[in-house]
C-alpha cells in the first residue's frame, strides 16, 4: 500500500490592512482586503509584526467598528499599509501575515 503525502498549498500575496482586533498599541489580528476584494481576519500576529502594525494604527487615529465578509467584528484603520500574507494554507480560509511591506 502506498502512503499518500499531504501537500499544503499556499500562495503569498500582498493585502491591504483595513482594520485590526485588540488594542491599537498591540493588535492581536488584522483585517486584510485580499486581491479578490474579500475582507478576512488574519491568524494571530507575531510580536514583531504586531509592533510594526501598531505604529501605523496609532498614527492613523481612532477607527470605527466594522465587520468582515464573514461577520467578524474589527476596528477600521486608514488605508496605506500593505502586508504580505500566506493565503489558503489549509482547507479553511486561513490568512497568515508574514511581514509588513
Image (cartoon, rainbow, N blue to C red):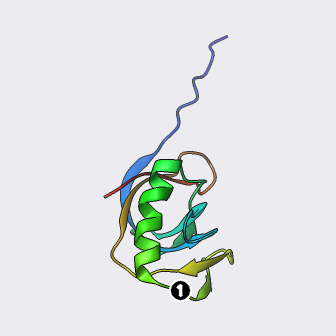
Name the quadrant containing residue 101.
Answer: bottom left
In terms of secondary structure, where does tag 1 sit?
loop
Name the quadrant containing residue 68.
Answer: bottom right
**Residue 43 left/right relative to 18:** right
Could you say which is closer to the camera, residue 61 or residue 36? 61
**Residue at (38% x, 50% y) in the render:** 12
Residue 31 picture location, percent across and down = 53, 70
Q: On screen, 91 above or below 93?
A: above
Residue carrying label 1: 63
**Residue 2 left/right relative to 55:** right
Could you say which is closer to the camera, residue 59 or residue 99? 59
**Residue 2 left/right relative to 86:** right
Q: On screen, 55 above or below 52?
A: below
Q: Residues within 10 Å of mark 1 (few under 14, many from 20)?
A: some
Name the quadrant containing residue 23.
Answer: bottom right
**Residue 2 left/right relative to 96:** right
Q: Is residue 8 in sight in this rendering?
A: yes
Residue 54 picture location, percent across and down = 47, 66
Amino acid at each position: 500500500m502506498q502512503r499518500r503525502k499531504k501537500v499544503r498549498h499556499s500562495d503569498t500575496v500582498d493585502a491591504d490592512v483595513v482594520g485590526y482586533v485588540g488594542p491599537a498599541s498591540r493588535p492581536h489580528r488584522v483585517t486584510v482586503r485580499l486581491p479578490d476584494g474579500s475582507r478576512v481576519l488574519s491568524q494571530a500576529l507575531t510580536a514583531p509584526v504586531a509592533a510594526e502594525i501598531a505604529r501605523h494604527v496609532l498614527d492613523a487615529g481612532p477607527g470605527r467598528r466594522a465587520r468582515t465578509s464573514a461577520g467578524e467584528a474589527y476596528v477600521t484603520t486608514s488605508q496605506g499599509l500593505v502586508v504580505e500574507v500566506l493565503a489558503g494554507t489549509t482547507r479553511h480560509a486561513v490568512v497568515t501575515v508574514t511581514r509588513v511591506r
